[in-house]
Image: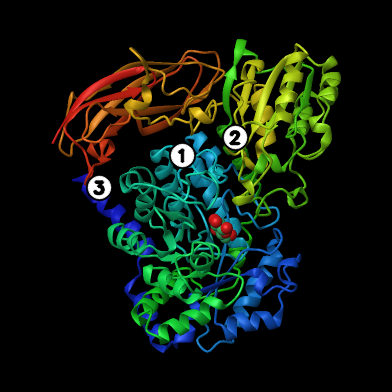
Amino acid sequence: MKNSVFALMVFFFSQSLQSQTPAEKIKVDALVKQMTLKEKVGQMTQVTLAVIAKGGWGNQDGAIDAAALKKAVVDYKVGSVLNTTAHALSVETWNKIIKEIQDEAKNTKLKIPVVYGLDGMHGQTYTLNSTLFPQNIGMAATRNPELAVAMAKVTAKEQRASGVRWNFAPVLDIGRQPLWSRFPETYGEDVYIGKTMGARVIKAYEEDGLKNPTAVASCMKHYLGYSNSRNGKDRTPIYMPEIEMREYYLPQFREAVKAGASTIMINSGEINGEPVHASKYLLTDVLRKELGFQGMIVTDWEDIIRLHDRHNVASTPREAVVMAINAGIDMSMVPSDFSFYDLLIEAVKKKEVPMSRIDDAVKRILALKFKLGLFDNPYPESAAISNFGKPEYQALALDAAHEAMTLLKNKDNVLPLSKNTKVLVAGPSAQSISALNGCWSYTWQGKEEQWYPSDSKTILQTIAEKVGAGNVSTSTGKGFDNALNYDAGKLTAAAENADVIILCIGENAYAESPGNTRDLALPDDQIALVKAAAATGKSVILVLTEGRPRFITGIEPLAKGILMAYWSGKKTAEAVADVLFGDYNPDGRLPFSYPKSSGEIVLYDRKPTEEVREVFNDNISSGYDPLFPFGHGLSYTSFEYSDLKLSDTILSGNAKLTVSIKIRNTGGRDGKHTVELYTRDMYASITPSMKRLRAFQKINLKAGESKLVTFAIDKNDLAFVNAKLKTVTEPGEFEVMIGDKKGKFIYKQ
Ligand code: BGC
């Protein structure tokens, strides 16, 4: 009874984030009745800041061109503006930009405010001195949804302080293709982590109520299947049977809709030859009718015209507009001209797009604007501005970076290092800021270090602060690409007086297509550094700053310690130093399987036929053979699992099964630890996975302390998509796995 009341409350709460109040509906309907076709189509048009900025894309200071602004807002009646021109701008500049745009909107007949949208994927990207947190891949490693919630709340506050109320986040694409350049923006390869983190983050953005100066509208993206590109390059073809789509790619969006996401952005790619922007099936039948999404659908960058000039499914630009709008698109991120506006008006006049579809789209856009309080006050709010850059955000950024750090290897307990150790800090990331933050960091690509806050620190700096300058040497220069960083001879010479070499390697920042790579192998010049370091005979510790797994199989044996730092934002360098020297006991767990090589990309939730390597007369169970498995992550203490107990051996119907386990910290240090519960369906009509993550809990254990951890699972946690594309739980035997312990139970309908 209690449960069902709670479920009902959750339902109404989540619906209320997206759907309208009766009063809002009356206002929206009344407004739409007064609107001309031009005004409606204008609302559906979104342009980029360069269209209204002085000097266009070349603009550096956010100054608005009054004539261009008038043309966009008064003549074309655009409903939305997005993006920056070259780089991040100050809070004051953003506030000025927003004020000028909203002032101009007051010069239109209906005075409909403009909604501004910005990307804030790991903190507010385009505002100078905003707080940047780990990328989603690092947040997934924390296994700590509370941290993800806290980070989203800060992102919302810093975005709203900038006068912007619409965040193009979170990315809900699943990271099952490590070549893909947007892998760092994902929560990794597992569906459960993705849908749990994603839904919590969406609620965090929106739950205060969108009128509140602490909230922003979220934009779940990129619907659907974007990450599954066959060749690994961004925005290239996806071939995916619907059963796979529903099992691995759709659940995150289903949960996000339930969590109340206000808007959604569409995948620029194509699935089975059909661009998603033209797919009435995915946009209307699945998203609207099946998932029940009531919010607003926006395209990604230029994705309507690309139906014509890239995908070649529309023979004219107008046909592209007709396809997309009839498929269900509400707003077009055009974004560099007004072609969409002209073409859609023409198409409606020719009756190629029904007026009912236009009204539907416009109502959703206006509903969003009402919800955001833009009709009450479209201007930057002083209550919001005062929330920018609070000191506690730095502490949160450090907590998040700490919990992201994933210790992959610690041979002979080489780590933590004593603070008296003489260390050589080398490698291209040693004096780089951008390689610690990655994409969407003050610029789109994140590479231009001049825009980062002046108190951002490098790994060399934080290590020197910790152990004293006298204990630290380096062979590197400033910036990732500095030629000094790749000089193996210099490294060898500099290592002479060091006991340990800390080699910071990996990837510099990149985003989207510029991040496409020909090879996941770590570049030769970095491999050479590792070999040179090992040849000195000193202990080598690798610090990996990377957005996706770069192959290190050949050099892994040369390192005694390996710390995966990901791109963990503002406090990456502090967190790295804390872990290396024992001021923080690492607790991150890999959110993906770290592959050995391109022929060994097998995911943890493999099928039985991937588990077995068939050799004539000899089947070997080593099909899943990553360098480091999904969920791997070492600690400076040790944890022992015992007393796995199931509340019953039979789970019936809609009942819950309680699974408990005792965890003891058997080492000498306090530590956090994530307990993960996996299940395996022993036999099913669709080949079952060897294991699937169904729940996790992060706990804190003092040295010597024990805790009982309890999970409750039900039939939904055991479900899969069957051959009829229905999500079902079939009766039969299941295995539950926590740590090294296993139990069995039977599910009966
Ligand atoms: C990206 C989106 C982003 C948009 C606006 C596109 O290139 O794919 O994720 O929201 O640009 O910046």
Query: Which colour style is shown?
Result: rainbow
Q: Residues within 10 Å of mark 2 (few under 14, many from 20)?
A: some
The quarter of the displayed image where residue 470 is located? top right
Disc 1 residue type (three-letter): Arg
Relative to residue 528, is residue 404 depicted above or below?
A: below
C-alpha gap between disc 3 and disc 2: 34 Å
Q: Residue at x 47, y 13 (%)?
A: 666
Residue 675, position as x, y percentages in the image:
41, 27
Disc 3 residue type (three-letter): Leu
Q: Label 1's element?
A: loop
Residue 233, position as x, y percentages in the image:
55, 47
* Ligand 1 picture quarter: bottom right
Residue 520: mark in rendering: 2
Disc 2 residue type (three-letter): Leu
Q: Label 2's element?
A: loop
In primary-sequence order, the first of circles 2 and 1 is 1
Residue 176: mark in rendering: 1
Q: Residue at x 38, y 57 (%)?
A: 260
Residue 491, position as x, y percentages in the image:
82, 23
